[in-house]
Image: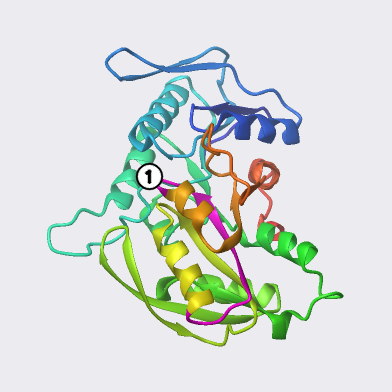
Amino acid sequence: MNSYSESIKVFTGNSNPEFAKTVCKELGIELGNADVKHFADGEASVSLLETVRGADVYLIQSTCKPVNDHLMELLVMIDACRRASAGRITAVIPYFGYARQDRKAKSRDPISAKLVANMITVAGADRVLTMDLHASQIQAFFDIPLDHLLGAPSFVDYYMHKFPEAEYDHENDFVVVSPDVGSVARARNFAAKVHMNLAIVDKRRPKANVSEVMNIIGDVRGKTCILYDDMVDTAGSLCNAAKALVEVGGAKEVYACATHGVLSGPAYERLENSVIKEMLFLNTIPEIANTPSHKIKFLDVAPVFARAIEHIHGATSIADLF
């Protein structure tokens, strides 16, 4: 195990600097001074403008779009810290890109999530801190310690305040909905925490980013539905599920929440035109500039990451964060 001083250093790339600043504010420290930029040909360039020798270093970088640019920034930052004799290097990756490529779906497919895990390890990271991996087993892709935070507690707190049990009958008037069979375990755990029943949208996907709703398993008629997932990319699947809940299932209204708002292509337009009343994300990925929406809201989980960093630095359990 590496030895390191009591000094905490936090640096960030270009993926989500405001998130990193909030983490530092919660920790009561200044954001580390580094110059992370790109040359004219696109190569990533990192210069650490302060010493990290012997320090406990945390590099905050979501590998969101442009995914490869942000991933390369992270790898070069890790290498820079390792060569500058940092005591310990923790890659803080609120959103872990490539997580959906976690298995061979057909012959000759790569397992890119494993490749990225190997790259982070070989670059010199000593541990990883992330939130809501698309598949929990991705934790096993890393040969270094990984702390896996959950976004569910933030959503539980939000909905328990929005719909307090003293005023609403959670069991009879609400239902948590899994947008597909693969997310059932995640949705079931969330439903138990908000004391609501569970329903499932059964669908088939003819090709990538195209889904067709087939059936609704569970009673949603006349109820307020909360669609729960780990990420929203093009939003087609989620919006189709919401439409089916209302038109097929007879739901009263639909809310939705997901940890990571990838929001590619027509996602914003689809969400705006959907039957979803409110779309809730965590700020693991920053909101896209100049795309305001009256439906989309972001919850700040930077304080959660700050507490996790405090626990990791102090070598204490992070179980209380769940």
Q: In the depicted view, which residue is nearer to us: 101 or 238?
A: 238
| Circle 1: residue type | Gly
Q: In the depicted view, which residue is nearer to us: 11 or 162?
A: 162
Q: Mark 1 points at which residue?
A: 265
Q: Can residue 194 be seen in this view?
A: yes
Residue 150 locus on image (x, y percent): 59, 58
**Lateral position of residue 287 relative to residue 207, left or right:** right
In the rendered image, the vertical position of residue 250 relative to residue 267, given as above or below: below
Q: Quadrant of the C terminus?
A: bottom right
In the rendered image, the vertical position of residue 162 relative to residue 36, given as above or below: below
The residue that appears at 20% across and 53% down in the rendered structure is 110
How many discs mark residues in the rendered view?
A: 1
Q: Residues within 10 Å of mark 1 (few under 14, many from 20)?
A: few
Q: In the depicted view, which residue is nearer to us: 190 or 265?
A: 265
The answer to which image quadrant residue 49 occupies is top right
Write down the region rendered in magenta.
248-266
Q: Can residue 322 be seen in this view?
A: no
Residue 22 locus on image (x, y percent): 68, 33
The answer to which image quadrant residue 10 occupies is top right
Tell me, yes or no, whether the highlighted magenta stretch contains residue 265: yes
Residue 183 locus on image (x, y percent): 46, 70
The residue that appears at 40% across and 28% down in the rendered structure is 73
Residue 227 locus on image (x, y percent): 55, 68
**Lateral position of residue 196 relative to residue 198, left or right:** right
Q: In the depicted view, which residue is nearer to us: 82 or 209?
A: 209
In the rendered image, the vertical position of residue 82 relative to residue 115, given as above or below: above
In the rendered image, the vertical position of residue 238 relative to residue 5, given as above or below: below
The answer to which image quadrant residue 135 occupies is bottom left
The residue that appears at 59% across and 52% down in the rendered structure is 281
